[in-house]
Amino acid sequence: MALQGMLTLVYLPSLLWIITSIYSNADVKAVALRIPGSGNLGVSAFILSSHRILPSASSLSPTLVASPLLVSTSFNSQHLSLHEFPLNASKKKKGVDRSRSKKGGLDDVDSDAEATAVSEADLDALFAALRAKLKDCEEHLRNKISRLTLHRATPSLVESLTVELPGESKEKQLQYASRIMSKGPYELHVVPLSPNYLDAIFVSLSTKLVDYKVTMQPDRISVVIPSMTDAMIQQARSIVKETQQEVKARIRTARQDLLKKLKAMRKGLSDDMYFRQEKELDSAVKLSEQSVDNVANKALRNLG
């Protein structure tokens, strides 16, 4: 949105002003008129929009002159000289009172506050991203622990194995031919859906689970998984502890990343709002760290 090249002639008593206003998000440029012999006339810049003329500045310091004499011309037999003054519309100038309580001040909230204000949606997005990161950290620990406990007897250990069944043209997965149950941390019971399947399932499991102890019982098959050695247990405990510390370090990094973003938004937040966000951040991080500790400690207890 820009109004470029607009020239307005304003006649004041004994003065001739030529004001050129160029409006953008960052700069307003005003051209001031000097009439030889009449002294400095001062500067007033206007933004022309919607058929209204709104004052945007009332005075300028001589140090703001961006260039020397740019143009000279003649008008009504008087020699005119024009100087260009850049105005930064987004910053307050020293000596310019922009108070809303004074005449000539802004009618609305300062444009700086509007430009830097942080919305609730912005904060919600930040914390949603944080919670997603914290959840990923917690899941990483759970997945690592689940791989360590694959040595335990769980139905998933054998349910995808295929078996040849009497009267069937194709092999079936064990989970579709039997019920599989855990009988403690190191033993599974496989109960065929039909008594005719018992021998076939026993042969298949004995062939495929060579490291396990497979025995046939009257109506089921027992699969015993060798227990973990002391060395295996110690190694697993070390992995759990290392992963626990690794995940907590990731959580602290996520906290620092969000804290940096909050500090970058500091100007757009009230003191109360800023400290409330810090408190919410610390609360979310604390809950995540507690969850990680609980998962790790439970795994360590199960390992013995």
Image (cartoon, rainbow, N blue to C red):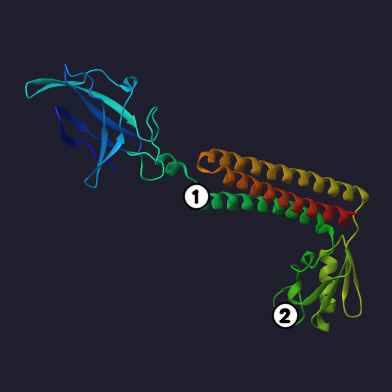
User: Is residue 119 shown above or below 54?
Assistant: below
Q: Which mark is residue 119?
A: 1
User: Looking at the picture, how far across and down is residue 28, in whole percent?
Assistant: 30, 33
> In the rendered structure, are the residues bearing label 2 and label 1 in contact, judged by CB atoms less than 8 Å apart?
no
User: Callout 2: helix, strand or loop?
Assistant: loop
Instruction: Give the residue type that dot 2 points to.
Output: Glu
> To which residue does mark 2 refer?
168
Apparent side of residue 1 relative to residue 113 in the rendered image (left or right): left
Q: Which mark is residue 140?
A: none
Question: Residue 162 is drawn in which quadrant?
Answer: bottom right
Q: Nearer the viewer, residue 76 or 84?
A: 76
Apparent side of residue 264 relative to residue 89 in the rendered image (left or right): right
User: Looking at the picture, how far across and down is residue 126, in whole percent?
Assistant: 56, 49
Apparent side of residue 140 relative to residue 262 in the rendered image (left or right): right
Q: Nearer the viewer, residue 286 or 242?
A: 286
User: Callout 1: helix, strand or loop?
Assistant: loop
Q: Nearer the viewer, residue 91 or 238?
A: 91
Instruction: Give the residue type that dot 1 points to.
Output: Ser
Which residue appears at 79% of the width and 81% of the height? 193
Residue lying furthest top: 37
